[in-house]
C-alpha cells in the first residue's frame, strides 16, 4: 500500500508539472537560411471546402518563399481538437477562427497575437467581432449574412407576389400562409432547427445585447413562428428535428417556397442544381424581412445578422515568422483575395463591386438586381458578441429555443426560465 | 471461498419422494411442446424484427440520394436505387486504408486487453496479498470517471511522449483498461479452487496454472471480452478523432465521417453505405464465432 | 506443516508467505497496471486536482479550493442534470438486466437458427451510434413516425411526442438505450450461463424442481459473480451516459434529457470552464463509487451466506 502511494505521488507530481505548463511553441518549421518558411494553418473539410487551399496558393504565388500548409481538422469538433492541440503546444501558426464565440477562449488563454497593426481595407465587415478591449486578435476574410431565398417558380404557381425588398415580418407571414394554401404539397417557408434562424434576427433587428439577460423582445418572434407552425405554413420544429430535415433538401427539392438562410447556401444550391441533387428551378435572393418599415426597401439598408470567419495568429509564433503571418492576414482580407473567393461562391468580408460581380458571375447564380442588392447591401450585426460569457448564454438560449418550439413550455415560462438561468449560472 | 461452495452444492428446495418426482418430471405431451416451440419462435422473430428494423432502414437509406434520405413522410424503400453510393465509397474514398488501420487497432488492442487483463485478473482473484482489494477498487473506480473529463491531461501526456498522431496512442489508450480485468476476475471466481489446488500439489507454478488451467476454462469469458473489446475499438470515434490526425491513420469511423461531411452538409446516403460496410465484418465474426460463447465447458467430469 | 513451530517462527513464516504472495500477485498485475497507472490513473488524479482550480486549459490555474463545488450546489442546471441522470438510471438498469438476462436464457438453447437470433440481438450494439440516433429519431417522429402511426391505429388518439416532448423524451431515451445495450449484456450473460454445471440442473430436475425453481435456485446463484459485474458496469455506464443522448437529443427539448456527462462536456469544452467541469466529474465519480461500494458490500454479504 505504501508503495502504491509513493509511486502515485511521484507520477502525480510529474503529471502536474506537465499540466501546469501550457503548451508553448507553434508547430511550423523555423525560417530556413534562404528566408523561405512554412506557415501552418488550421482548416476543416479541406476536400469539400476549397477556400483555404485557394488562399494558400494565391498567397504563395505572391510570396514564393512562403508556403502555407493547410492542416485538416474535423468540422464538427474543430474547436475541441484545436484546443487540445494548442494545449499540448502543437497548434498551427495561423489559427482559423471558425466561430466568434470561441475567440475569447483563445485570447484569454494567451494563444492569440495582437494583430491590430494588420491593415484592413475600408468597409470590410466583421472586424469588430474580433476586437477585445479595442485590440484586434483576428482579422476577417469571410462574412456570411442571412438573407431570404425564394423559389420564383413556386411563387408564380401559387399566384403570390415575389418579395421585392420591402417586406416586414408581417408581409412574410402573410405570403407564407398564402403560399401554403395555394401550393399542393409544398410549404410556404422552411425554418431550419438552429437557434439562429429565429434568435439571430431577433437580436440583430432589436439591436439587443445578448449578454444583458433580458429576452422579452424575442416573444413576438416566437409567437409568429408558433402561429406559422400551427397553421401548417411551415414544417413544425418537432418534425424538422425528428426527421432530420436538411435545409438543402427542403429548399432544393422544392418542399418550401421560401427559406431564410446564410449566404453560404448560394454556392451549395448552384452546385446541387448542376449535379441534379436539387431540382431545376428559378430562384432568387431577397433581403431578409425587417422588423418595421424603417429599414425596408432598396433605398435603405436592411438589418440582418451574421458572423465573420477569420484568421488569428498563434501567440507563440517565432518573431521572424510573425510578419509573414500578418501579411497573410492582410492578404486574405484584401480585394484580390475577396474576388478569388467570390468566384468560388464564398461570401467574402469585403463586398466591393468587383467582388460582387465575380460572385454573381458563376453559372447558375441569380442575375436579378434584388439578389445583388440582398447580398451586397446590408447591415450585418454579429450573431455572437466576443465575450467569455457568450457560449454559456447561447447554450441557455438554445435550451429555451427547443423548449418553446417543441411546444413543451409556454413562451413566457421559457423566457423567464432562461433569464433566471442567465442570472444565476452566468452571472 | 464460499462462492465456490455455492457452485458445487446448492441445496434443492424440498426433498421429494421418488414417486412424485417421476410423475412431476414427466415431460408435457409432444403436442404441447410443439405449440410452445411455435410461440417461442414467433416471439423471437418479432424480437429480431425489432432489433433489425433500424438496420434495415439504414441499408435502404444507403441506396438513396443525399436529399431523399430524410423526408416527410418517412420513406422506407428508395424511389430509385442509388448503387453509386457504394461505388463511390470503394473507389473515391480511402476505405482500404481505413479498414487496414481499424483492423490493426482492433486486433492489437483486443489481444493486449485479453492477455494483460486475464493475467492481472488472476493476480486479483487467486492470490491474496495486502492491499489487493483496495487496488481492485481503485481499478473499478476509474471506470466511474467519464473519459472526456481526463482526456486533456491524457492527451498532453501522450503528446509529450511523442506518440500522439500515431497508431500507438490508441493502442496504449485502450489496451490497459480496467474493464477487462474486472470481467475476467469475475469469471475466475466461478472456477472452483479444487482445480488449482490439485495443480499446485502437482507442482505447477501459479503462471502454469494460469496458462494451463484458467485460460482454457474461461473460453466463453475470453470470447466475450475479445468480442466486446473488438467492437468497441472498431466503433471508437472520439479517441481516433483526437489522436489520429493524419489521413493515413484514419479509422473507418473517422474517414467515413470526414468523407461525407463538409461544414453544413452531410451526404447521408453515402454515409450509411459506409456504415453498412463497417458493420458487416463484425456481424460475420459474431455469427461464425458463436460456438466460442456457448461451448459448454468440457470438464463436466471435474466435480467429484 | 510443523505444528510445533514457535510463535515467532510462525510469524516469520507468515510474513515471508505474505511477501511471496505480494511479489507473486504484483507480477501478475504489473503489465496491466503499468499501462493503467500511466495512462488512466495519473490523468484521473490530475483531474481531481483540477477540480480545485479554475483552469481553462491555457495558462496557469489558480487554486480555488472548494469554490467549484459550492457553485455546483447552487447551479440549477447541475441539479437538473443530476436528477435526470438518476431518472435515466433507475429506469434503465432494471429494464436492461431483465431483458438481457431473459434473452440470454432464451437463446441458450439449441434452437434452429439460434445463431441468427443471437446475432440479431447483438446488432443494435454494433451499429454506429450516429445511425441509431438518426433512425430512432425518425421512428419516434411524432407526426410521421411509424410508432405513433401504430399507436394511432390501435386507438390512442394523442400519442406522446417522444423525443420532442419534455415529458416523454427521457422514457424514449431509456427505450432506445435498452434496445442498444441488451445485446451487449446478453453476450456477458450467455458466457456466464456456460459456467452453470449441467449436473446441477440435472440433479434439480431429478428432484422435481420446475423451470422456475431451477432458475431461482441453480442458475441465479451460479450467475452471481457475473450478475455483480453486470450490475456494477451497467450502473456506472448509466450514470456516465453521454454519446447516445448527445446525438439523440443534445439534452433537449429544453433540458429534459441533459445528464451529468453532458453538463461536464458543455462546461468544459463549450464554455471553457475546465476547473468547474472537473468538479462536476468528481461529483459523478463519487456518485458511482458510493453506489458501487454499496453493491460491493451487498455482494460480499450474499457470497458469505
Image (tube, coloured by chain):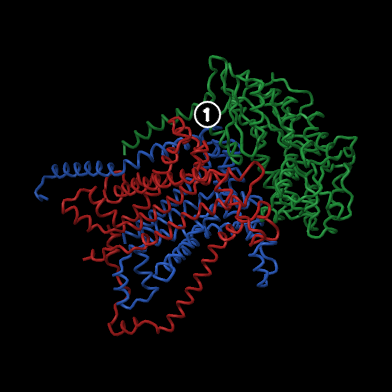
Chain colours: A green, B red, C blue
Q: Is residue C259 above or below residue B48?
A: above
| Image position, residue A410 (x, y; %) | 74, 53
SS at badge 1: loop
Mark 1: few, some, or many residues within 10 Å (few <14, many ≥20)?
many
Residue beneath label 1, please?
A90
Residue at (57, 32) in percent of width and height: A71
Q: Nearer the viewer, residue B52 or B152?
A: B52
Q: Nearer the viewer, residue A84 or C10?
A: A84
B13 with respect to A251 (left or right): left
C9 with respect to A56 (left or right): left
Residue at (89, 42) in percent of width and height: A166
Q: Quadrant of the N terminus of chain A?
A: top left
| Image position, residue C194 (x, y; %) | 34, 63
Q: Quadrant of the C terminus of chain A?
A: top right
Q: Is residue C130 above or below residue B242?
A: below
Let me know if residue A119 appears in the view: yes
C6 with respect to A374 (left or right): left
| Image position, residue B74 (x, y; %) | 67, 60
Q: Is residue C56 above or below residue C303?
A: above
B51 with respect to C165 (left or right): left
Q: Residue A369: which quarter of the image?
A: top right
Disc 1 chain ID: A
Let me know if residue C83 appears in the view: no
| Image position, residue A356 (x, y; %) | 80, 32
Q: Residue C176: which quarter of the image?
A: bottom right
Amino acid at each position: 500500500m505504501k508503495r502504491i502511494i509513493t509511486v502515485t505521488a511521484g507520477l502525480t507530481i510529474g503529471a502536474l508539472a506537465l499540466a501546469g505548463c501550457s503548451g508553448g511553441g507553434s508547430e511550423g518549421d523555423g525560417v530556413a537560411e534562404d528566408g523561405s518558411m512554412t506557415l501552418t494553418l488550421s482548416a476543416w473539410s479541406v476536400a469539400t471546402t476549397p477556400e483555404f487551399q485557394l488562399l494558400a496558393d494565391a498567397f504563395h504565388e505572391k510570396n514564393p518563399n512562403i508556403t502555407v500548409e493547410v492542416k485538416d481538422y474535423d468540422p464538427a469538433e474543430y474547436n475541441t481538437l484545436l484546443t487540445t492541440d494548442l494545449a499540448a503546444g502543437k497548434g498551427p501558426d495561423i489559427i482559423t477562427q471558425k466561430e466568434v464565440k470561441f475567440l475569447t477562449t483563445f485570447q484569454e488563454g494567451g494563444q492569440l497575437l495582437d494583430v491590430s497593426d494588420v491593415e484592413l481595407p475600408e468597409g470590410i465587415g466583421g472586424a469588430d467581432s474580433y476586437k477585445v478591449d479595442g485590440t484586434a486578435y483576428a482579422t476577417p476574410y469571410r462574412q456570411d449574412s442571412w438573407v431570404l431565398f425564394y423559389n420564383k417558380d413556386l411563387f408564380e404557381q401559387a399566384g403570390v407576389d415575389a418579395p421585392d425588398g420591402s417586406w416586414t415580418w408581417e408581409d412574410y407571414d402573410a405570403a407564407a400562409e398564402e403560399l401554403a394554401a395555394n401550393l399542393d404539397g409544398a410549404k410556404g417557408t422552411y425554418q431550419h432547427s438552429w437557434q439562429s434562424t429565429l434568435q439571430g434576427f431577433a437580436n440583430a433587428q432589436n439591436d439587443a445585447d445578448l449578454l444583458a439577460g433580458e429576452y422579452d423582445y424575442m416573444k413576438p418572434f416566437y409567437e409568429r413562428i408558433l402561429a406559422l407552425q400551427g397553421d401548417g405554413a411551415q414544417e413544425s420544429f418537432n418534425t424538422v428535428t425528428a426527421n432530420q430535415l436538411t435545409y438543402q433538401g427542403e429548399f432544393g427539392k422544392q418542399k418550401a417556397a421560401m427559406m431564410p438562410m446564410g449566404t453560404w447556401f448560394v454556392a451549395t444550391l448552384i452546385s446541387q442544381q448542376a449535379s441534379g441533387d436539387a431540382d431545376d428551378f428559378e430562384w432568387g435572393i431577397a433581403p431578409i424581412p425587417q422588423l418595421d418599415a424603417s429599414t425596408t426597401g432598396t433605398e435603405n439598408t436592411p438589418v440582418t445578422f451574421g458572423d465573420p470567419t477569420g484568421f488569428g495568429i498563434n501567440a507563440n509564433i517565432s518573431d521572424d515568422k510573425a510578419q509573414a503571418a500578418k501579411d497573410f492576414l492582410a492578404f486574405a482580407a484584401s480585394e484580390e483575395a475577396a474576388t478569388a473567393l467570390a468566384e468560388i461562391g464564398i461570401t467574402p468580408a469585403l463586398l466591393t463591386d468587383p467582388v460582387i460581380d465575380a460572385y454573381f458571375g458563376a453559372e447558375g447564380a441569380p442575375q436579378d438586381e434584388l439578389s445583388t442588392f440582398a447580398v451586397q447591401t446590408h447591415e450585418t450585426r454579429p450573431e455572437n458578441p466576443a465575450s467569455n460569457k457568450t457560449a454559456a448564454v447561447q447554450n441557455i438560449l438554445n435550451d429555451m429555443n427547443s423548449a418553446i418550439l417543441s411546444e413543451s413550455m409556454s413562451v413566457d415560462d421559457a423566457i423567464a426560465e432562461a433569464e433566471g438561468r442567465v442570472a444565476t449560472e452566468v452571472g | 471461498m464460499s462462492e465456490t461452495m455455492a457452485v458445487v452444492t446448492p441445496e434443492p428446495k424440498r426433498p421429494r419422494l421418488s414417486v412424485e418426482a417421476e410423475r412431476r418430471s414427466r415431460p408435457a405431451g409432444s403436442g404441447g411442446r410443439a405449440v410452445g416451440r411455435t410461440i417461442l419462435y414467433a416471439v423471437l422473430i418479432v424480437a429480431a424484427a425489432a432489433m433489425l428494423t433500424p438496420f434495415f432502414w439504414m441499408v435502404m437509406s444507403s441506396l438513396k440520394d443525399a436529399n431523399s434520405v430524410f423526408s416527410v413522410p418517412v420513406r422506407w424503400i428508395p424511389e430509385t436505387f442509388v448503387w453509386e453510393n457504394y461505388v463511390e465509397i470503394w473507389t473515391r474514398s480511402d476505405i482500404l486504408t481505413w479498414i487496414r488501420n481499424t483492423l490493426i487497432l482492433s486486433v492489437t488492442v483486443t489481444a493486449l486487453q485479453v492477455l494483460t487483463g486475464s493475467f492481472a485478473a488472476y493476480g486479483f482473484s487467486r492470490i491474496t496479498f495486502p492491499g489487493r482489494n483496495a487496488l481492485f477498487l481503485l481499478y473499478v473506480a476509474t471506470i466511474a470517471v467519464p473519459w472526456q473529463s481526463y482526456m486533456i491531461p491524457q492527451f498532453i501526456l501522450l503528446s509529450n511522449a511523442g506518440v500522439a498522431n500515431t497508431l500507438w496512442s490508441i493502442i496504449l489508450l485502450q489496451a490497459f483498461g480496467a474493464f477487462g480485468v474486472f470481467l475476467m476476475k469475475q469469471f475466475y471466481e466461478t472456477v472452483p479452487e479444487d482445480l488449482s489446488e490439485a495443480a499446485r500439489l502437482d507442482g505447477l507454478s501459479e503462471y502454469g496454472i494460469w496458462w494451463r488451467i484458467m485460460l482454457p476454462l474461461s473460453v466463453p469469458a475470453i470470447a466475450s471480452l475479445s468480442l466486446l473489446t473488438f467492437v468497441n475499438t472498431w466503433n471508437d470515434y472520439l479517441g481516433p478523432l483526437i489522436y489520429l490526425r493524419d489521413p493515413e491513420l484514419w479509422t473507418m469511423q473517422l474517414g467515413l465521417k470526414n468523407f461525407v461531411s463538409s461544414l453544413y452538409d452531410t451526404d447521408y446516403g453515402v454515409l450509411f453505405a459506409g456504415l453498412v460496410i463497417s458493420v458487416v465484418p463484425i456481424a460475420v465474426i459474431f455469427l461464425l464465432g458463436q460456438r466460442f460463447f456457448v461451448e459448454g465447458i468440457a470438464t463436466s467430469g471435474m466435480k467429484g | 506443516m510443523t505444528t510445533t513451530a514457535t510463535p515467532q517462527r510462525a510469524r516469520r513464516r507468515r510474513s515471508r508467505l505474505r511477501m511471496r504472495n505480494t511479489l507473486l500477485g504484483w507480477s501478475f498485475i504489473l503489465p496491466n497496471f503499468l499501462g493503467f497507472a500511466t495512462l488512466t490513473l495519473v490523468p484521473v488524479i490530475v483531474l481531481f486536482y483540477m477540480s480545485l482550480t479554475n483552469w481553462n486549459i491555457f495558462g496557469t490555474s489558480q487554486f480555488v479550493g472548494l469554490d467549484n463545488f459550492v457553485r455546483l450546489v447552487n447551479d440549477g442546471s447541475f441539479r437538473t442534470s443530476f436528477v435526470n441522470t438518476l431518472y435515466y438510471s433507475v429506469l434503465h438498469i432494471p429494464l436492461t438486466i431483465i431483458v438481457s438476462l431473459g434473452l440470454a436464457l432464451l437463446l441458450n438453447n439449441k434452437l434452429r437458427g439460434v445463431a441468427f437470433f443471437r446475432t440479431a440481438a447483438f446488432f443494435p450494439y454494433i451499429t454506429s451510434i450516429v445511425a441509431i440516433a438518426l433512425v430512432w429519431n425518425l421512428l419516434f417522429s411524432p407526426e410521421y413516425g411509424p410508432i405513433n402511426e401504430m399507436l394511432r391505429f390501435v386507438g390512442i388518439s394523442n400519442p406522446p411526442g417522444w423525443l420532442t416532448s419534455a415529458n416523454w423524451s427521457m422514457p424514449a431515451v431509456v427505450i432506445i438505450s435498452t434496445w442498444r445495450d441488451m445485446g451487449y449484456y446478453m453476450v456477458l450473460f450467455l458466457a456466464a450461463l456456460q459456467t452453470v454445471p449441467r449436473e446441477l440442473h440435472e440433479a434439480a430436475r431429478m428432484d422435481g424442481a420446475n423451470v422456475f425453481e431451477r432458475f431461482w435456485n441453480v442458475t441465479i446463484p451460479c450467475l452471481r459473480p457475473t450478475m455483480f459485474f453486470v450490475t456494477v458496469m451497467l450502473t456506472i455506464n448509466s450514470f456516465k451516459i453521454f454519446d447516445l443522448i448527445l446525438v439523440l437529443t443534445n439534452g433537449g427539448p429544453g433540458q429534459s434529457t441533459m445528464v451529468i456527462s453532458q453538463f461536464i462536456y458543455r462546461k468544459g469544452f463549450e464554455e471553457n470552464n475546465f476547473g468547474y467541469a472537473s468538479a462536476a466529474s468528481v461529483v459523478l465519480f463519487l456518485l458511482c463509487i458510493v453506489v458501487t461500494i454499496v453493491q460491493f458490500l451487498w455482494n460480499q454479504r450474499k457470497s458469505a451466506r
